[in-house]
Image (cartoon, rainbow, N blue to C red):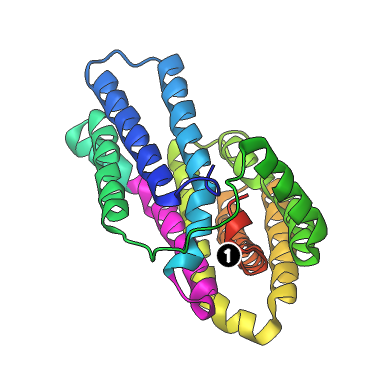
């Protein structure tokens, strides 16, 4: 979709839908009608809008910054996400304590207005009209697969991504279980571990440009993969807070270094017409 139609319009529509869903969720919470099933439903629908918009957001990055700054821009995006991960749990707890449970949902709904405004005000350079016929949906999918199969640079990036994220994603899936089970903690401990991951990612993003310039992208990915493996092994074998928190700091730095390197590699290998796919 993000390759076939105007990405800005697609994102505007998705953000309006997500903002409306968030506002309805806040209303349901305010009226006391929220249930676990409704919360899961709204989370699922908001997740769908995020998943539909993610390729367009990623593909727009090269339109916003020149190529020499692409690596820093990708890392900066990761910093924003991880700053939220680092301070979000604590800030949410403060808001709930001071104002009540409904207000984090209200603030979440209002936050979409800022994104919608930014997209509305953004004016990208007009591109020359193509003389080729417009692609069709299924045909565009097949073209994307053919491009991935025939591009050595993209194929190498995809193989490395599969090798890293398939196993590295276990960190996100199992961290709450480790906090609750072996460490016998609650939401506070889990929030602290997430904050450590976020802080590590922010620190890693700041160190990324000089380190990458020294060792290169290939070694950067290898070092990040090895560091994440060590951090996950520490969490598995020594599930106590004095070990888990430094391990989460290392995991955050490792995750952002590999994510940024692979993301930039894919961005550099892809022309605009197929980038979202």
Residue 168 belongs to magenta span = no
Residue 121 percent location from the top left of the image: 26, 57
Residue 96 percent location from the top left of the image: 26, 35
Front-most of 215 and 272?
Answer: 272
Identify the residue at the far front of this view.
131
> Quadrant of the rendered structure where residue 12 is?
top left
Q: Is residue 245 left or right of residue 161?
A: left
The part of the chain drawn in magenta is 65-90
Front-most of 142 and 180?
Answer: 142
Reply above or below: 164 against 271: above
Label 1 crowd (10 A; few <14 / some 14-19 / many >=20): many
> Quadrant of the rendered structure where residue 209 is?
bottom right
Residue 24 percent location from the top left of the image: 29, 24
Q: Is residue 197 visible?
A: no
Q: Which residue is mark 1?
A: 253
Q: Residue at x 67, y 50 (%)?
A: 235
Front-most of 269 and 179?
Answer: 269
Q: Residue at x 29, y 33 (%)?
A: 105
- Quadrant where the N terminus is found in the figure: top right
Residue 88 belongs to magenta span = yes
Reply above or below: 210 against 168: below
Q: Is residue 19 visible?
A: yes
Q: Principal SS element in the magenta part?
A: helix
Q: Residue at x 70, y 51 (%)?
A: 165
């Amino acid at each position: 979709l993000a390759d076939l139609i105007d990405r800005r319009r697609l994102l505007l529509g998705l953000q309006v839908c997500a903002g409306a869903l968030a506002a309805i969720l806040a209303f349901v919470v305010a009226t006391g009608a929220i249930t676990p099933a409704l919360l899961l439903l709204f989370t699922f629908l908001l997740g769908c809008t995020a998943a539909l918009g993610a390729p367009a957001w990623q593909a727009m990055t090269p339109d916003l910054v020149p190529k020499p700054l692409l690596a820093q821009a990708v890392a900066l995006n990761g910093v924003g996400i991880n700053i939220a991960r680092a301070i979000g749990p604590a800030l949410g707890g403060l808001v709930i304590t001071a104002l009540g449970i409904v207000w984090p949902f209200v603030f979440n709904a209002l936050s979409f207005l800022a994104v919608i405004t930014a997209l509305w005000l953004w004016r990208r350079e007009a591109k020359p009209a193509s003389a080729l016929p417009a692609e069709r949906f299924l045909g565009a999918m097949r073209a994307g697969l053919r491009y991935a199969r025939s591009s050595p640079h993209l194929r190498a990036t995809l193989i490395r991504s599969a090798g890293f994220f398939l196993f590295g994603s276990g960190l996100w899936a199992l961290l709450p279980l480790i906090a609750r089970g072996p460490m016998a903690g609650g939401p506070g401990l889990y929030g602290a571990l997430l904050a450590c991951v976020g802080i590590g990612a922010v620190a890693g993003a700041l160190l990324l440009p000089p380190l990458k310039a020294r060792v290169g992208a290939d070694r950067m990915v290898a070092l990040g993969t090895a560091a994440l493996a060590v951090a996950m092994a520490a969490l598995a074998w020594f599930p106590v807070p004095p070990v888990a928190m430094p391990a989460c700091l290392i995991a955050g730095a490792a995750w952002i270094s590999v994510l940024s390197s692979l993301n930039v590699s894919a961005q550099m290998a892809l022309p605009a017409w197929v980038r979202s796919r």
